[in-house]
Image: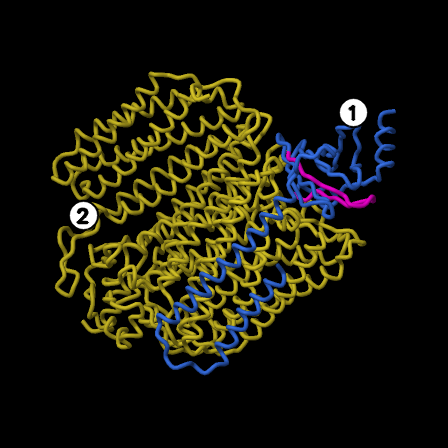
Chain colours: A yellow, B blue
C-alpha cells in the first residue's frame, strides 16, 4: 500500500459525515477541538461586549447609561462568561485539538465523551445566553454569595440560571478533564515515556487533575444553594444552623485553584512556543514540570486569601498569607526558566513572540501586585476595590489571553495549512497591548484612591472622573485590537496562501503531518525516543506517511490506535474507537432536559429525563463492545498486542477511576461542610438529632459488604471465563439491601430538613442512595449481558469497571450511614 | 513594597531586552545555566524576598490587632440593604442611623454584623475593611487621630443599592464626646 492509498483508506475510516450531519455526529477530536475553540471564542466576544458596557457605564460619574439592576447583571455575566464559558472551554478545546497530535496518537481516549462534553457546554452556554438576552441573567456577582443569592434576597429565576447553567457547563469540564488525564497517561506514541512528553502535555495533565479536584466543591456548593433556593434546605441560613461562610469556603476552594487552572495551560503554551522562537529547547524541563506540579498543590492551600476580611482568626490569616506568597516561588521558577531559555538560544521577534513579550510585561506586574494583596494589612484596604480588579486582569488577561493569542498565531499554520499574508496581527497586538495597560494601570490607581469594585456609579466630587474616562477609552482601543485579530483570522482562513509544513522549525509531533491535518492524524503511529522527535529526525513525517511504524495497515472499518504503559510508554494494547454517533448529542440533550426542568421547577420531568439519561448511557456502554475481532492482534513491526477491552484494566476502568476521584472530592467537600457547620456554624446544635436505627445500619453495612465481595468473586469468575450469574445475583441482592436501608434513613432525615443539620445529613444519605442505585443498575446491566451472551459477553474489564463503582458505592453507603446514625452520640 | 516591585519588574524587563540584544555566548553547559537561572533567580531570589516581606506583613498585622486596653470604647455597627445603624456600649438604647460617633484619639472596637446579606465595614482612613456577616459578629479596631468627619462605605457587593451604601464617622474631641453621650442620655 503506498502513502496515497493509505491516506485514502484511513480518511474513509476516520472522517466524519458530510454537511450538517457531520457536525452533530462527529466524534473526531480535531473536529470537536475546533468547535470548542470556535464557541469559546464567541463567548470571549460576548464577555468582551459586556466589559465594554461596564466601561461605558463607568466612563462618567453619576452615569445613567444603565440602571444598577441591569448593571449588576452585566458585571455578574462578564465574570461568569469569561471564567466558565471562555477560559476553561478554550483550554479544553486547545487540549482536545492538540493533545493527540502532540502525543503521537490518533484520537483521545473517549471520542464520544469529547462530543458529549462539547454539547453539554453548548447547551449550558445557551441557557446563560438566553438569560442574558431575556434580562433574567444572574445579578449577585459571579461569586454568588448567599444570603444575597438566596431566595429571600434574589427571588427571581436569575440566580437559578447561574447555579444550574454553570453546573451543566461544569459537567463538560469534568468530562474533558477525565478524558485528558486518561489520554495523556495511556494514549501516547510508543516509547514516549513521561520524561519525553511534550511540555504542554504535562501542563494539560496537571490542569486536568486540578479540574477534577477543584470543580467538585463548587458543584456541591451549587447543588446545596439550589436546594436551599428551591426547597428551603437552610445550608447557608445562619438562623437555622447554616452559615453563609460555608458557601464562601466551598466557592473559593474552587475559585482559587481556578486561577491556576486558567494560568497553567497558558504557561504550557509559552513553554512550547518560546523555545521554538528562540531556536532552542526549554531550559530545565524537569524544573518546569516540578514547578507546575508544586503550583497545583499550593493553589489548593490558599483559598482563604479571598476571605481575609471575613473575620478569620489571625493565626489562620498568617498561614494563608504565607501560602499565598509561597505560590510566587514556582511561578518565579517558570518565569526565569523562560528567560534563561531566551538567553540560551537566539530569539526571533515573530508575532507569537510579540504576544509572549506582552505576557512577560503584564503578568510580572500582575504577579507583583498579587504578592501585595497576599500581605494581609494591605489586603484589608485594597480588597474589593478597583485595585483588585486591575490585579486580576493583569494576571488573567496577561497570564491567559496573551499566551493564548501567541498560541493561536503559532498553531494557526498547523490548523489551516496556510501562511499569514496580511500583516494585521502586529497592528492588533499593539492596540491590545497599549489599550490593556492603559485601561488597567489606571484602575490600580483609582482603586487605591478608594473606588470600590462593582459600583454602578460614583459621585462627581470623588475625583475619579478623569482616570475612569482614560481607562474606558483605553479599553475601547483594546476592543478594536481584539476585533482586528478576529478579522485577521477570518481573512487568514479564507484568503491566505498555502504554507509549508513546519514553518517555525518546531520539533514536536503535531508538525510531522500534512496540514491541515487529516482526520486520522498519523498514517502510522511513530516510535518516539526524544522530546523533540521531529528535530532529531526531519524525515519522520515521510516515514509516518509511508506507514513504517505501528498500525500502518488499515483494517476494515476499525479506527485503531495504541495504548501504552503510563510511565514507560511501552506499547500495551490495541484500541478500537467507536465511529461517528449521534448518541453524544442525544445524551447531552437528555442531560440538558433534566437541568432545564429543574430550572423551570417542573420537577416531575427531572426523573423522566434522568431515566432517559440512564437508558442512553446503557446503550452507549453496550454499543462499544461489539468488537470486530477477538484475541491477540498484530499491530505492525512484528508486535503482538491484546485488545484494550480484553485486558484487566481497559481505558474505561481508568476513566471510571478518575471520575470517581472527582466524585470522592465532592463527597469529601460534603463532609467538610458537615464538620464546618458542626464546629464553626452559629446556632448549633440542632433542636433534634437523627436517632440511631440499628436495623438501617446493619442492613446497609451488610448489604454493601455483600455487594462488594460478590463482585470481587464475579471478577475472578470472569477471568476464568466461568459463569457470573450466581455472583451477580447475590451482589444485586446486597445492593438492594443497602438501597432499602438508605431509603429508610432518607425518609427519617427528610423530617429534619428545616434545620441545616438535617438538611446536610439528608444530602449525605441521598448521595449514598444515588451511588447505590448506580451500582445496582450496572450490576443488572452485567447480568443482562451474561444472560444474552452472544456477541457481547461481559469481559473481565467490564466486570472490573462495575466492581470499581460498587466498591465506591459500598464505601459511601457505609461512611454516610455511620456519620449520620451516630451523630447524636458525638456531642 | 512599590519600590521593590518596580525593581523586580525592571530586572525582568532588562533580562528580556538583553536576550535580544546580546550576541550569544560560547556554549555554556546546560547544567551551569540551570544553576544560574533556576536555582539562583528562580528559587533562592523569590524565597528570600518573600520571606522578608511576609515577616514584615505579619508584624505589621499584629500591631493592627485589637489589644486589651482600658481606654477602649465599644460601638456596634449593623448593616442592612442599604443603610448602617450604630449602637453604643456607653449609652444603652442609643442608636444613630448612617452616622457613627466615636471619640478621637482613643481606640474604638466596632462590633460588626448584618441583618440581611453580607456587607463590609470600610472607613478607609481609619482602618481596613471587615465583613458584616449575618449570624456572626466581627470586631474591628479603629482609631481616629484627629477630630473630624471620616467617610465610610459598605464594601462588599450587596445588591442594586450597593453604589450609594455609605456612612459617616464623626470623631469628637473629649468634650464633644461627653456632650454626645450626655445628649443621648437625656
| Label 2 residue SS | helix
Against A661, residue A727 (above or below) is: above
Q: CA distance from mark 1 to mark 2?
A: 79 Å
Q: Quadrant of residue A561?
A: bottom left
Asked whether residue B80 appears in the rendered view, the answer is no
Query: Which quadrant holds residue B130?
Result: top right
The numbered mark at residue A646 is 2
Picture residue at 20% right of the left edge, 55% below the top: A572
Instruction: Locate residue A811, reporting x and y percent.
Output: 32, 32
In depth, the one of A30 and A819 nearer the eye is A819
Residues packed near mark 1 inside 10 Å, few (<14), some (14 to 19) or many (20 plus): few
Q: Which of pointers 1 and 2 indicates the residue nearer the eye?
A: 1
Left or right: B128 with respect to A166? Answer: right
**The N terminus of chain B lies in quadrant:** bottom right
Q: Nearer the viewer, residue A320 or B81?
A: A320
Q: Which residues are magenta?
A: B138-157
Q: Position of residue A804 (x, y in %)?
A: 27, 38
Name the main secondary structure of what is drawn in magenta: strand
Q: Which mark is residue A117?
A: none
Marks 1,2: beta carbons within 8 A: no
Q: Which residue is mark 1?
A: B93
Give percent across and percent down for residue B81. 71, 36
Expressed as whole percent of the image width and height from the top left, the position of residue A6 reads 23, 69
Camera-side residue of A603 and A343: A343
Which residue is located at x 68 percent, y 44 percent? B155
Chain of the residue where label 1 is placed in the rendered structure: B
Q: Nearer the viewer, residue A158 or B31?
A: B31
Amino acid at each position: 500500500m503506498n502513502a496515497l492509498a493509505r491516506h485514502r483508506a484511513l480518511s474513509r475510516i476516520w472522517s466524519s459525515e458530510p454537511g450538517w450531519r457531520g457536525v452533530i455526529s462527529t466524534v473526531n477530536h480535531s473536529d470537536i477541538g475546533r468547535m470548542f475553540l470556535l464557541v469559546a471564542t464567541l463567548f470571549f466576544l460576548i464577555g468582551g461586549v459586556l466589559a465594554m458596557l461596564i466601561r461605558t457605564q463607568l466612563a462618567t460619574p453619576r452615569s445613567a447609561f444603565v440602571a444598577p439592576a441591569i448593571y449588576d447583571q452585566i458585571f455578574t455575566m462578564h465574570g461568569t462568561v469569561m471564567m466558565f464559558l471562555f477560559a476553561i472551554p478554550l483550554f479544553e478545546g486547545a487540549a482536545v485539538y492538540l493533545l493527540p497530535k502532540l502525543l503521537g496518537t490518533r484520537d483521545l481516549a473517549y471520542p464520544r465523551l469529547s462530543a458529549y462534553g462539547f454539547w453539554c457546554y453548548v447547551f449550558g452556554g445557551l441557557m446563560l445566553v438566553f438569560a442574558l438576552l431575556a434580562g433574567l441573567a444572574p445579578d449577585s456577582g459571579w461569586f454568588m454569595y448567599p444570603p444575597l443569592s438566596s431566595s429571600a434576597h434574589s427571588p427571581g429565576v436569575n440566580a437559578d440560571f447561574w447555579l444550574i447553567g454553570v453546573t451543566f457547563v461544569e459537567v463538560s469540564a469534568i468530562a474533558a478533564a477525565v478524558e485528558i488525564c486518561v489520554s495523556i497517561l495511556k494514549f501516547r506514541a510508543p516509547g514516549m515515556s513521561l520524561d519525553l512528553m511534550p511540555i504542554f502535555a504535562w501542563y494539560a495533565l496537571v490542569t486536568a487533575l486540578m479540574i477534577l479536584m477543584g470543580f467538585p466543591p463548587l458543584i456541591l456548593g451549587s447543588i446545596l444553594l439550589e436546594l436551599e433556593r428551591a426547597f428551603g434546605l437552610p445550608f447557608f441560613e445562619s438562623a437555622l444552623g447554616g452559615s453563609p461562610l460555608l458557601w464562601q469556603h466551598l466557592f473559593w476552594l474552587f475559585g482559587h485553584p481556578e486561577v491556576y487552572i486558567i494560568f497553567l495551560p497558558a504557561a504550557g503554551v509559552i513553554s512550547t512556543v518560546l523555545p521554538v522562537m528562540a531556536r532552542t529547547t526549554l531550559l530545565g524541563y524537569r524544573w518546569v514540570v516540578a514547578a507546575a506540579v508544586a503550583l497545583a498543590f499550593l493553589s489548593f492551600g490558599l483559598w482563604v486569601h479571598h476571605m481575609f476580611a471575613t473575620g478569620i482568626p489571625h493565626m489562620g490569616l498568617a498561614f494563608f498569607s504565607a501560602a499565598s506568597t509561597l505560590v510566587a516561588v514556582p511561578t518565579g521558577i517558570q518565569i526565569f526558566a523562560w528567560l534563561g531559555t531566551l538567553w540560551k538560544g537566539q530569539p526571533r521577534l515573530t508575532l507569537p513572540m510579540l504576544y509572549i513579550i506582552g505576557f512577560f510585561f503584564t503578568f510580572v506586574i500582575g504577579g507583583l501586585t498579587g504578592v501585595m494583596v497576599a500581605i494581609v494589612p494591605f489586603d484589608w484596604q485594597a480588597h474589593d476595590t478597583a485595585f483588585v480588579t486591575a490585579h486580576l486582569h493583569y494576571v488573567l488577561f496577561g497570564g491567559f489571553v496573551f499566551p493564548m493569542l501567541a498560541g493561536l498565531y503559532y498553531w494557526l499554520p498547523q490548523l489551516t495549512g496556510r501562511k499569514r499574508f496580511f500583516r494585521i496581527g502586529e497592528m492588533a497586538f499593539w492596540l491590545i497591548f497599549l489599550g490593556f495597560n492603559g485601561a488597567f494601570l489606571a484602575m490600580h490607581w483609582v482603586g487605591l484612591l478608594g473606588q470600590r469594585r462593582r459600583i454602578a456609579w460614583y459621585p462627581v466630587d470623588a475625583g475619579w472622573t478623569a482616570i475612569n474616562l482614560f481607562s474606558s477609552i483605553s479599553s475601547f482601543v483594546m476592543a478594536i485590537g481584539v476585533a482586528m485579530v478576529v478579522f485577521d483570522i477570518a481573512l487568514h482562513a479564507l484568503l491566505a496562501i498555502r504554507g509549508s509544513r513546519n514553518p517555525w522549525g518546531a520539533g514536536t509531533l503535531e508538525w510531522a503531518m500534512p496540514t491541515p491535518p487529516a482526520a486520522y492524524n498519523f498514517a502510522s503511529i511513530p516510535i518516539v525516543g526524544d522530546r523533540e522527535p521531529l528535530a532529531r529526525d526531519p524525515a519522520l513525517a515521510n516515514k509516518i506517511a509511508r506507514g513504517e511504524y505501528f498500525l500502518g495497515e488499515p483494517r476494515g472499518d476499525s479506527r485503531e490506535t495504541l495504548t501504552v504503559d503510563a510511565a514507560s510508554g511501552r506499547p500495551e494494547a490495541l484500541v478500537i474507537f467507536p465511529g461517528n454517533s449521534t448518541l453524544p448529542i442525544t445524551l447531552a440533550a437528555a442531560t440538558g432536559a433534566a437541568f432545564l426542568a429543574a430550572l423551570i421547577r417542573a420537577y416531575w420531568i427531572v426523573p423522566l429525563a434522568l431515566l432517559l439519561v440512564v437508558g442512553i448511557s446503557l446503550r452507549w456502554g453496550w454499543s462499544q463492545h461489539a468488537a470486530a475481532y477477538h484475541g491477540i492482534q498484530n499491530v505492525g513491526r512484528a508486535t503482538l498486542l491484546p485488545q484494550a477491552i480484553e485486558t484487566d484494566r481497559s481505558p474505561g476502568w481508568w476513566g471510571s477511576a478518575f471520575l470517581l476521584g472527582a466524585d470522592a472530592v465532592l463527597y469529601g467537600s460534603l463532609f467538610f461542610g458537615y464538620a464546618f457547620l458542626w464546629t464553626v456554624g452559629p446556632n448549633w446544635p440542632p433542636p433534634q438529632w437523627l436517632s440511631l436505627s440499628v436495623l438501617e445500619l446493619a442492613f446497609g453495612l451488610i448489604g454493601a459488604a455483600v455487594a462488594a465481595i460478590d463482585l470481587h468473586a464475579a471478577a475472578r469468575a470472569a477471568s476464568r471465563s466461568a459463569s457470573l450469574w450466581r455472583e451477580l445475583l447475590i451482589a444485586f441482592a446486597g445492593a438492594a439491601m443497602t438501597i432499602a436501608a438508605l431509603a429508610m434513613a432518607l425518609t427519617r432525615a427528610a423530617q429534619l430538613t428545616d434545620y441545616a443539620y438535617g438538611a446536610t445529613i439528608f444530602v449525605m444519605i441521598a448521595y449514598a442512595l444515588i451511588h447505590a442505585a448506580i451500582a445496582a443498575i450496572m450490576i443488572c446491566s452485567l447480568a443482562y449481558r451474561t444472560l444474552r451472551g452472544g456477541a457481547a459477553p461481559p469481559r473481565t474489564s467490564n466486570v472490573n469497571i462495575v466492581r470499581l463503582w460498587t466498591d465506591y458505592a459500598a464505601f459511601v453507603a457505609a461512611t454516610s450511614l455511620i456519620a449520620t446514625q451516630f451523630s447524636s452520640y458525638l456531642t | 513594597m512599590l519600590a521593590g516591585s518596580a525593581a523586580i519588574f525592571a530586572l525582568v524587563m532588562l533580562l528580556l531586552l538583553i536576550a535580544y540584544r546580546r550576541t550569544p555566548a560560547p556554549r555554556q553547559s546546560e547544567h551551569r545555566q540551570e544553576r544560574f537561572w533556576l536555582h539562583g533567580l528562580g528559587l533562592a531570589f523569590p524565597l528570600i524576598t518573600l520571606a522578608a516581606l511576609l515577616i514584615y506583613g505579619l508584624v505589621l498585622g499584629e500591631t493592627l490587632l485589637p489589644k486589651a486596653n482600658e481606654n477602649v470604647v465599644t460601638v456596634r455597627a449593623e448593616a442592612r440593604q442599604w443603610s448602617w445603624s450604630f449602637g453604643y456600649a456607653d449609652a444603652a438604647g442609643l442608636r444613630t442611623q448612617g452616622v457613627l460617633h466615636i471619640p478621637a484619639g482613643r481606640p474604638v472596637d466596632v462590633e460588626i454584623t448584618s441583618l440581611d446579606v453580607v456587607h463590609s465595614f470600610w472607613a478607609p482612613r481609619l482602618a481596613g475593611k471587615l465583613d458584616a456577616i449575618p449570624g456572626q459578629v466581627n470586631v474591628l479596631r479603629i482609631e481616629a487621630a484627629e477630630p473630624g468627619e471620616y467617610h465610610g462605605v459598605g464594601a462588599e457587593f450587596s445588591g442594586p443599592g450597593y453604589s450609594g451604601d455609605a456612612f459617616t464617622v464623626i470623631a469628637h474631641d473629649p468634650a464633644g464626646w461627653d456632650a454626645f453621650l450626655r445628649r443621648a442620655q437625656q
